Amino acid sequence: MFKSLITYRIGADLALDLPTVAEALAKEPFHPCAPTQPLSVGWAPPRGIEHGALVEAVDGHWLLQLKREQRILPSSVVADRVEELAEHVEESTGRKPGKKARKDLKEQAVHELLPQAFTKTSATLVWIATEQRLLLVDAGSTSRADEVVTLLIQAIPGLSLQLIQTAESPAAVMAAWLQDGVTPEGFQIERELELKGSDEQKPIVRYARHPLDIDEVRAHLVAGKMPTRLALSWNERVAFTLTDGFALKKISFLDL
């Protein structure tokens, strides 16, 4: 289930061919971390079915999943092991290890400890709307979305992606909605808002679980503060927060 969406436009040069994309992803499948491997990233069936299709297609919409597994090795645990190894070296040689030697000891400690480390697994869904030539990543941050986009571009020859650009800035549009109370058909302003000022102090005003059709909000807008986050709903079916970067966050489906 999607929780956040960052949207990219697919370049016109690539023909969106399902078998070609599936074949490309199959060259970079996900495998669990090997005992001494700190991180493993690859493509996995989006439905979580073993040996399932790497691309699920329904009426021109494709679903992909990037899976990552990382071994969690706290730095304090590594540091303790390095100290143990350093003490052993000092006892056996009579000299404390120097900077280069300690670096080697750290590599040894990590190599020893990785097989014992717990693993953390996460997955990022990707939705491709082929007719609209849009690619949407279920990521709460651009850094996580960038990782997915980079791996997709590496996997699929000819693929180019660009963050979607709107004709008007999302902040300006959200400000207009708040000023006049008129939203596009089907959309409803909800009860969460963040406003930021552009002056030197960059003041921030947040409303949570609070009506937004009030003079105070409009006064902040007149004073120059602009919306950076606004909670909305659509047709009483989906609720989400729209950001000034045109990302959707806190997506929840109200009719489930």
Image (cartoon, rainbow, N blue to C red):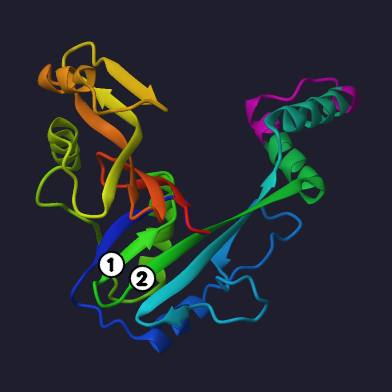
Q: Is residue 198 visible?
A: no
Q: Residue at x 40, y 81 (%)?
A: 21
Spatial distance from mark 2 to mark 1, Cα to Cα?
A: 6 Å
Q: Position of residue 219 (x, y in %)?
A: 16, 17
Q: Nearer the viewer, residue 175 or 55?
A: 175
Q: Which residue is mark 1?
A: 134
Where are the magenta residues, as a range?
91-103
Which quadrant would residue 178 be assigned to in this image?
top left
Q: Is residue 96 magenta?
A: yes
Mark 2 vs 1, N-terminal side = 2
Q: Position of residue 190 (x, y in %)?
A: 34, 38
Where disc 2 sits, the SS reads strand
**Is the stretch drawn in magenta largely helix, strand or loop?**
helix
Q: Is residue 141 magenta?
A: no
Q: Residue at x 68, y 24 (%)?
A: 98
Q: Which mark is residue 128?
A: 2
Query: Please, what is the three-letter code of the amino acid marked with disc 1?
Result: Leu
Q: Position of residue 247 (x, y in %)?
A: 32, 47
Q: Residue at x 55, y 66 (%)?
A: 42
Q: Residue furthest right?
A: 92
